């Protein structure tokens, strides 16, 4: 089970106790925000894409949406999300619990700048009813991210 892989991953850092599990679904930004009693923008949603043959995760703020022009400029290809079946197989987590922790080998993780405005964010932990609160430096450390990217829209203050 994915959440067990994520807990085992965090156990090596003595952080498995910080993984939160809910009696309700946290599979969407809205549901996660309700379960955590926080603003939806603080949910660190993890979106899965294919860039050529490489599975790519973009971790972005809950109120951000992929900007196709920025994405294409950064990755030199059109944004193509993985299907739920592809995500489970290629990332190692089912949609609703996709996260940048304990992923399959070869998955590249990118953090979107939409997250930088928060002290802490809440990414999922491999299941549709889990999360962990991490500071941005902790997210950088534990996600194994490759780079910060600016590929989202609709999150900036007007």
Image (cartoon, helix red, strand yellow):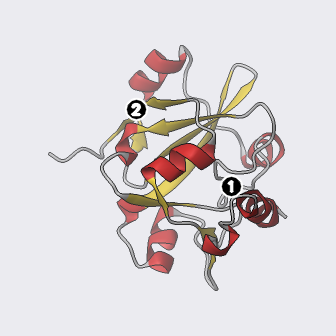
Residue at 47% of width from left, 76% of height from top? Answer: 36
**Residue 117 image offset from top left, x and y in percent:** 30, 49
Q: Which residue is denoted by mark 2 in the rendering?
A: 67
Q: Which residue is denoted by mark 1 in the rendering?
A: 95
Q: Is mark 1 on a helix, strand or loop?
A: loop
Above or below, 24 relative to 68? below
Q: Quadrant of residue 110?
A: top right
Give whichever of 154, 102 is nearer the camera.
102
Q: Quadrant of the N terminus?
A: bottom right
User: Which residue reaches farthest left?
Assistant: 158
Above or below, 121 relative to 109? below
Question: Which tag, 2 or 1, sits closer to the chain's start?
Answer: 2
**Residue 34 image offset from top left, x and y in percent:** 45, 77
Above or below, 33 relative to 112? below
**Residue 102 image offset from top left, x and y in percent:** 75, 50
In-image side of 157 versus 152 (left or right): left
- Could you tell me how far apart the alpha carbons at marks 2 and 1 are, in whole angstroms? 21 Å
Q: How many marks?
A: 2
Q: Are marks 2 and 1 in contact (CB under 8 Å)?
A: no
Q: How crowded is mark 2: few (under 14 residues within 10 Å), some or many (20 or more)?
A: some
Give whichever of 26, 3 is nearer the camera.
3
Residue at 78% of width from left, 41% of height from top? Answer: 86
Q: Residues within 10 Å of mark 1 (few under 14, many from 20)?
A: many
**Residue 31 image offset from top left, x and y in percent:** 51, 72
């Amino acid at each position: 089970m994915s959440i067990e892989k994520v807990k085992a991953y965090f156990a090596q850092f003595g952080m498995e106790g910080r993984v939160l599990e809910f009696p309700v679904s946290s599979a969407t930004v809205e549901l996660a925000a309700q379960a955590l009693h926080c603003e939806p923008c603080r949910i660190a949603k993890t979106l899965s894409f294919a860039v050529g043959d490489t599975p790519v995760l973009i971790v972005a703020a809950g109120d951000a949406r992929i900007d196709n022009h920025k994405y294409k400029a950064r990755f030199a290809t059109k944004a193509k999300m993985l299907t739920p079946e592809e995500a489970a197989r290629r990332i190692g987590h089912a949609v609703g619990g996709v996260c940048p922790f304990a992923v399959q080998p070869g998955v590249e993780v990118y953090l979107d700048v939409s997250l930088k405005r928060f002290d802490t964010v809440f990414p999922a932990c491999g299941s549709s009813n889990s999360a962990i609160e991490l500071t941005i430096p902790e997210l950088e450390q534990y996600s194994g991210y490759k780079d910060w990217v600016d590929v989202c829209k609709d999150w900036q203050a007007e």
